[in-house]
Image (cartoon, rainbow, N blue to C red):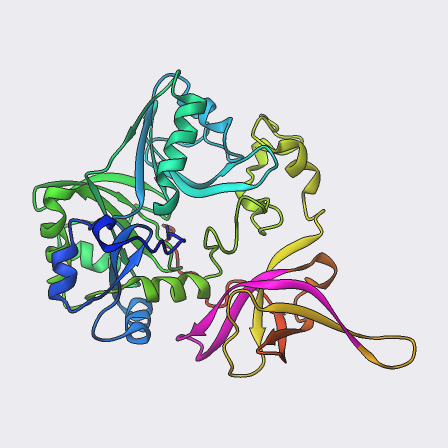
Amino acid sequence: MIDHHSVMNSPENLQRTALFDLHQQAGAKIVPFAGYEMPVNYADGIIKEHLHTREKAGLFDVSHMGQIRVSGSNAALLLETLMPIDIVSLQPGQQRYGLLLNAQGGIIDDLMVARIGENEFMLVVNAACKINDFNHLNNQLGSRLQLEMMPHQSLLALQGPAAAQVMQRLGQELTDMGFMSVRKLQVKGITCWFSRSGYTGEDGFEISVDDDHAVEIAETLLADDEVKWVGLGARDSLRLEAGLCLYGHDITDQTTPIEGNLLWAVSKARRRGGERVGGFPGDDIILPQIPKQVSKLLVGLSPQGRAPIREGAIIEDIEGNEIGRQIARQIGAVTSGGFSPSLGKPICMGYVDIKHSAENNVLNAVVRNKRLSINVSKLPFVARNYYRPT
C-alpha cells in the first residue's frame, strides 16, 4: 500500500518510525509526510531508486501506515457491512484490496484486508487516515468485534524482481506463496508477517515486524547486494507507472469505486446476482453504476510532448462548432502526474467525461495557459509483474 496526504506538521509534532536513524545514516532527504519524518529519497536520487526497484529490489519503510487487528465471531460478515469486497470466502493466509465506503458510495480509504485466522483479520490502512479509519471501524463494529491498533508494528516493503531470491538467500523458499497471500515466518529467529504484495507493480513482500526488531530485519535485507533503500518519491512514480490509485488524489470520499475504475474491487458476490448482493454503504448508488454507468471515469493519460503535466491540470476537449471555430470545454482534470523513469516520458491519470474515456482519444491539458495534447491510455503504463505459482 501507498499513503497519500503530505501533512505539514510543525517539527515538534512529527513522529518517527523505528527506522529513522537508519534513514539518516543512509543520507536520506527527510520530509514531513502524513505526520511523520519520512525519507523522500537517498543519495542516488529518485530516478535511480525507481529503476533499481524495477531491475533488482528496493526496500521501503512504510511503517507510517496503520495496522489494525480485527477479531471476533462473524468478523468476515461484519467487515462486509463496511466494504464491497468478498471477505467471507477469504481463506486464512489470503488477503484482498478493500475500500471503506460512506453512505454516498464515496471512498473513505483504500486498504488491504488479510485473513490471519478463522475469525481474525489484519488491516493495513493509509497513514493519514488511520485514526479516522479506526474510529469509523470502532463506531460501526466495536460493540461486536475486538479492534486493536498496532502502533508498535513496523512495516517494510521489499519490492522488485529479485525480492524472492533475496528471501531465498535468507533461507525462505517462497515459490508456493502467490500474489496476495500472507504467511507468518521466522527470519533470523524473528517472527514476521509476510504478505506477497506491494504498491509498485513488482513482485515483492510487505513485512510486518515488531518495532524492537525492525532495524535488525532492515539491516539483514540491506546486507544483500541487490537491495537498496528507496524513498517515497520513487514509491509514487512506481505506483503511477503501475496504474495504481493514490488515495486523496485519484480516489476520494467524493468518488465511487466505479468512477475510480475499480469495478474489480466490488466483488461479484456483492453485485446484483451475487450470493450476498449489496449490504455495504452506498450500495444503492454503486450497484446501478455497474459496469460503467457513470458520468466520469478515471483513465490513464499520455502527454504527447515532454512537458510534465501535474495534478490539478484541467483537461479539455476541442470541438468545432457550426461556423468552423474551435471551442474548448472542460471535461476533467489530472489527479496524478509525473515523469516515468521506466518509459522516459511524462505520464498521468485523471478523470474525464465518460464520453471521452475511450482509449487513444486525443484531448488537451491546460498547463500555464498553454494547451498540451494528451491521449487517453490503457492502464497500467508499465506491466505489473505479480507472482502467481504455476
Name of the residue lying farthest toward the right: 322
Q: Quadrant of residue 367?
A: bottom right
Residue 381 in percent (x, y) is at 50, 67
Range drawn in magenta: 327-351
Give the residue displayed 67% in from the left and 32% down from the top.
284
Q: Is residue 159 magenta?
A: no
Name the foreground residue: 369 vs 121.
Answer: 369
Name the foreground residue: 124 vs 277.
Answer: 124
**Residue 328 drawn above or below residue 67:** below
Q: Is residue 340 magenta?
A: yes
**Residue 107 drawn above or below residue 233:** above
Residue 294 in percent (x, y) is at 70, 48
> Looking at the magenta stretch, what is its main secondary structure?
strand
**Residue 351 drawn above or below residue 135:** below
Name the foreground residue: 206 vs 306.
Answer: 306
Residue 61 seen from this side: no
Q: Quadrant of residue 275?
A: top right
**Residue 330 drawn above or below residue 258:** below
Residue 225 seen from this side: yes
Residue 286 in percent (x, y) is at 64, 38
Give the residue displayed 54% in from the left and 43% down from the top.
253
Give the residue displayed 30% in from the left and 38% down from the top.
67
Q: What is the count of numbered marks?
A: 0
Left or right, 184 with respect to 298, comes to: left
Residue 110 in percent (x, y) is at 45, 44
Give the residue displayed 70% in from the left and 66% down from the top.
330
Left or right, 204 with respect to 384, comes to: left
